Image (cartoon, helix red, strand yellow):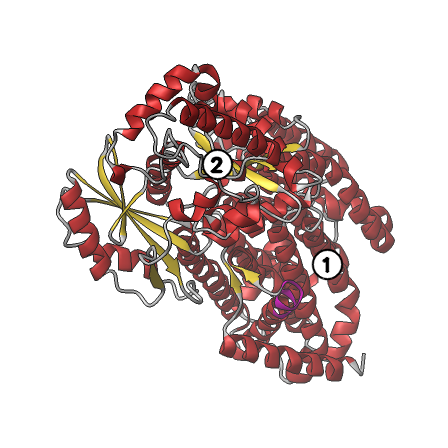
Amino acid sequence: MSRLPLLWTLIGALVLAHQSFLWTTGLPIETDLLTLLPSDTRDTAAEEVLHHLSEETSRNLVVLITAPTKAEALASATQFASQLESPKLARLTSNPNATSLPDQLAPWREYLLTRNQVDRLTATTPQDLTQRAILQLQQPLGARLTDFREDPLDLYSEYLRERAQVTKLRPEGDHLVFETTAGHHVLLRYKVLGGAFSLDGVAHLATALTTAKRDLPSTTEVLPAGVPLFAEAAAVQANAEVSTVGFGSLAAILLVMWLAFRSPRPLLLVVLSVGMGVAAGLSVCVLVFGKVHLMTLVFGASLVGVAEDYGIHYFASRQAEPNLSPRELLTHHTPGLFLAMLTSVAGYVMLALAPFPGLRQVALFSSVGLAAAFLTVLAWFPFFDRGVVKPTRFAAAWAATRSRWPSLSLKQLAIAVLCSSLVTAWGFSRLHAQDDIRALQASPQALIDAQRTVAERIGLPSPAQFFIVRGATEAERLEREEHLTTQLDALVPGKLLTGYDAVSNWVPSPERQRRQHELFDTTRQSILTALADELEDPTPVTLATPPLTVDDVLATQLGDALRPLWMKDASVVLLHAPTKESLPTLAALGSLPGVRFVDRTGDISALMQRWRIGMSQLMFAGYAVIFAALSWRFRGRAWRALLPTAVASGLALATVGFLGEPLTLFHILALWLLLGMGVDYGIFLIEHPADGGEAWLAIGLGAVSTLLSFGLLAVSSTPAIHAFGITLGVGVTLVWLLSPLSAPRGT
């Protein structure tokens, strides 16, 4: 024990130095909500795909300008682009000097036919094909991309026109334009530069966009969309919630500490222990994960309401036992404080079992924070606490209420437990589970609506559902893609999806290229032979180009669009607007050779359901472990420390049912925290005699600040955090009120 102050001082100095470094160089904050979600342990390729898609879209922002006429849309887009001023945004425009796609693909034109062209060339007689070629020969020369002897039917031009239908966007100057029933549209593209998001509480991008569209005509509609807007909204929301929860908790601590002790010393030392806990938790999180997520800061802010318990118990005991030195007092109280810290940390550690990286960050942040706060009390309080903690009226009045609080007999406890069980059962009957990850969406509805509208008008692919295709060779992978896309084509007429993006749309498999080249060559030879008398030279002009490869296409201007779809060991087929009704059919296609269907939304929702059920069942094991730890300390009285938490947990879930809120995994995880924290109240009441009521005073002061911390979480607009707040708010209140009822008489 004598070496602990020195050792903890050295650790404290390291933490302080690390915090100074973090805040002067920029705290690495993670805003991507996808990082909170579980990884796909079955297939790393799915994670690679998501990483690729995230890299492509995480900093891209688009603005869709819509007006009644094309001229108005172009004018509004030009005005908007000139007024959008933000150092965080860079405009993306196409390079007018870039070689056109027709020129880039021209060397392989003999291998490129659409499925419609193949069907027509196969089904049409040579005579009819010759007549079509004559008509082509009569067309103005400027309309053709190739010489007649190279391509008598001008199939290459037709191929490019059909492939161009994949996207509605058409370049016009430095704008991209298209038309729908909603009007004429211009798409502006931007990339977010540098560190775009900060915890300063200001919506930089949203403000810049609002300012830029302020002077546009009333007939013009401006719809911004992109991941950066959602990330910024989450950052602004998190900033507000960190402030509300963190400063609200701190204000509660300051108020109750001042009322109870009326001295700056206890107040400052408790704040020191809490500050050390938060700083240590933050440092360890950054060292382990590299970054700290915004949601960790929001949830971790509630740590303030738990970490102060050790300091409060210390000063409540100092107030009641002024004759004991600080070191003697801690020697007497350390076993109980350590057991309380251990059970609280155990509750947080259980969060780490769930496969959610965000929860693991919270678990690490809070566990380290609680341990650091406890060690701060143990190591530094005896050194800094050099005065007397005088009694106050508030503390005396609160402590006196313990003697008036009933302590029930075994028979009365049994009746109370039976009654609470009936209420719990009634509440449980009204519970309904909700595991759909989409129900946890906390983004502003206006952003969600704008994103959906832009996606529908442009035809953006869904990042939540896609296919992964594998093959031993490039040829095999392309063949399997073609087999899959043939099946997907059958779903488009029924509007089960509007289309798809696949590399094989542009790069046919070698076998298909061979067949198409033979068909192209046979058709060309037939036509030129039939028209030999009309042509000065009927010799066909052929190309000596080998078949098209994926690398060839990636080197063209299509490369940026296709590169995310082609990885080292797999390729990706992205779906456009798949409907909910299409999911069973799409899932069935996942059984094709080398094909796997990924429904990210469905997979995570199913995972949440499994863990909700699993963590509920594991709760019994958790109670058994805690009971064993309590039995080691309290023997036959262990059940008295645990009973209030068990009853409160059931009633907290029943309250969720009464409120009509859906039951989620996060309500169950909150019960684990309640188990770790709630049992502390029973521990302290059994550890310390009721003379003077210092244990009851400490429990009350700690409960009030804990309630304010977790109660404030309930006002969060993030459903997962709200679930923690409502469950813990009700649960902690009930444990606080029920603990004296089960405490042994005379304590």
Residue 121 is a magenta residue: no
Q: Distance between the residues labelled 1 and 2?
A: 77 Å
Placement of the C terminus among the 4 image quadrants: bottom right
Q: Where is residue 664 in the image (x, y as percent from the top left)?
A: 58, 36
Residue beneath the point at 67% across and 78% down? 381
Residue 466 found in image quarter: top right
Instruction: Let me know if residue 563 appears in the view.
Output: no
Q: What stretch is highlighted in magenta?
A: 283-289
Tell me the amino acid under the disc marked 2. Glu
Q: Compared to 605, does 251 lie above or below?
A: below
Q: Position of residue 11 (x, y in %)?
A: 70, 79
Task: First in sequence, mark 1 or 2: give its number.
Answer: 2
The residue to which callout 1 is attached is: 340
Prevailing secondary structure of the magenta residues: helix
Q: Compared to 287, does 138 lie above or below?
A: above
Tell me the amino acid under the disc marked 1. Ala
